[in-house]
Amino acid sequence: MGGGQKRIDAQHGKGKLTARERLELLLDPGSFEEFDMFVKHRATDFGMDKTHYAGDGVVTGWGTINGRKTFVFAQDFTVFGGSLSKTHAQKICKIQEMAMKHGAPIIGLQDSGGARIQEGVEALAGYTDVFQNNILASGVVPQISVIMGPSAGGAVYSPALTDFVFMVRDSSYMFLTGPDVLKTVTNEIVTAEELGGAKTHTTKSSVADGAYDNDMEALAEIRRLFDFLPLNNRAGTPVRPVFDDHDRIDESLDTLVPENPNIPYDMHELVRKVADEGDFFEIQRDFAKNILTGFVRMEGQTVGVVANQPMVLAGCLDSDASRKAARFVRFCDAFDIPILTLVDVPGFLPGTSQEFGGVIKHGAKLLYAYGEATVPKVTVITRKAYGGAYCVMAPKHLRGDINYAWPTAQIAVMGAKGAVEILHRKDLGDPDKIAVHVADYEDKFLSPFRAAELGYIDEVIKPQSTRRRVCRAFALLEDKQLSNPWKKHDNLPL
Ligand code: HXC
């Protein structure tokens, strides 16, 4: 009963489920095994010795999702507002340590007023123990956080250290300092929702990877994501039964790329038409929409997809898109998930805001992520692959394994118009001459064949056969062995 019926009713009144109800929806029926139900806090100040609730505000244990093991904890807002005491933290730490030992993911359902105020530094110590375990578990087992209520102050740092953060719209928020403090210190007047609600974190800050309308939808989607993820960094990607032919031809792809190179098309269409059963679990769908990241399956096996999106900023790379994709590529590499990269990129976005914002460093993150990744990497260039962006988007030269191009691909230092304006500046006043130069340039460089002659493209493929070719490429790469030189750890440009 957590903190009692009255508080449970209040929780329901806010449209929120209780910790136990959430775990019931997240896990397979009857699979939850609870630990530490009888743990009590040990605080005595402020009359705390008179108030105890079994379990101390967090429900922990393990269970299964579609038969696969996972460790879980769910904070119980009905007990001291889900606030974290030393013993509450010890329960979470126990789960984290078991997850690392047994090689199974950790899913944390957060709903907490932060550090238990009555415990002072004990609560801070507890939080930091949880953070330390988050760091040790990073890259060992997948860690997923779902924010289903408040997450304020230092409490935000445990989710921030995990692989994926999801939020529930209108009932969750995350911030370091709340609206009251902001008003006093900076004179800014802002609501909790504006400051740290799901919309803010999925569209502006990119702290969250996705948002859902209510608890039930969020938990159902976490189950869906879980099916794509390996249990740990050695388990290999899960393979699920597939009812979609690997050699399915899709003739509509032959006309996906418009004849006019300035007209966009929706890259989602290609992702869905290539994937098993059109199933695409998108990560950070609402942030840096000029690049798509997410999981699909090819012949039943999980594959991470990174794809430029010509519909937004013409598919240009910028700081946000580079950071988004780099983090995704690193997740895939850490957990041995093969990567499919779909390229249509006219270059990096020019501008002072990009340069002042450090696009050099952020772009380097993506370059770095692809270059260090040792998982199978298959790339398909559908249209533009220009300049620095060609170098970044998983080319052969960053140890790309199989690199395909469609006949519509254009691989060059830059587009014809820009190139001619630099190379033939003296002819700029003569449109006829310029037209000849542009045609000459397009003839020479704006096709995939120059790159194919040099072996930088393994094959020019028909768009309609993309699924078949990509499936075969990943099948070939199943036994790929590649490792990087020994190092303590790398020094990714942060
Ligand atoms: C102890 C807490 C608590 C806390 C809430 N409660 N937060 N108890 N420690 N941190 C208790 C309340 O006393 C109340 O108890 C019950 O939880 C529900 O809280 P309400 O305030 O009635 O709920 P609501 O109106 O929904 O507001 C929720 C809230 C608010 C916005 C979270 O409670 C709040 O502002 N709490 C304090 C948040 C905070 O400043 N935390 C510290 C952040 S700093 P009863 O008995 O009435 O049910 C931090 C440092 C971590 O966390 C550092 C790590 C490095």
Image: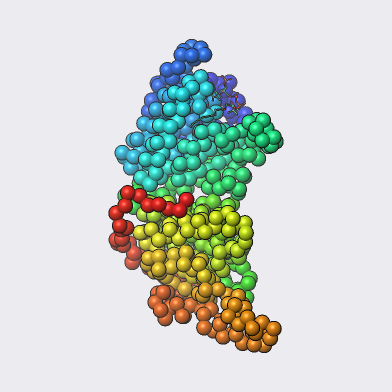
* Spot occupied by residue 354 in the image (x, y as percentages of width and height): 59, 58
| Closer to the camera in the image, 386 or 225 | 386
* Spot occupied by residue 394 in the image (x, y as percentages of width and height): 44, 64
Q: Is residue 416 visible?
A: no
Quarter of the rendered image showing ligand 1: top right
* Spot occupied by residue 88 in the image (x, y as percentages of width and height): 44, 26
Q: Is residue 203 visible?
A: yes
| Closer to the camera in the image, 72 or 364 | 364
* Spot occupied by residue 249 in the image (x, y as percentages of width and height): 47, 71
Tell me what residue is drawn at x 51 percent, y 51 percent.
Answer: 283
| Closer to the camera in the image, 395 or 458 | 395
Taking the image as shown, residue 171 lies to the left or right of residue 139, namely right
Taking the image as shown, residue 423 lies to the left or right of residue 301, namely right
Tell me what residue is drawn at x 48 percent, y 77 percent.
Answer: 448
Task: Tell me which colouring the rendered structure shows.
Answer: rainbow
Tell me what residue is drawn at x 47 percent, y 37 percent.
Answer: 158
Tell me what residue is drawn at x 65 percent, y 85 percent.
Answer: 427
Q: Quick one: which residue is furthest to the front in this view?
A: 426
Taking the image as shown, residue 430 lies to the left or right of residue 342, namely right
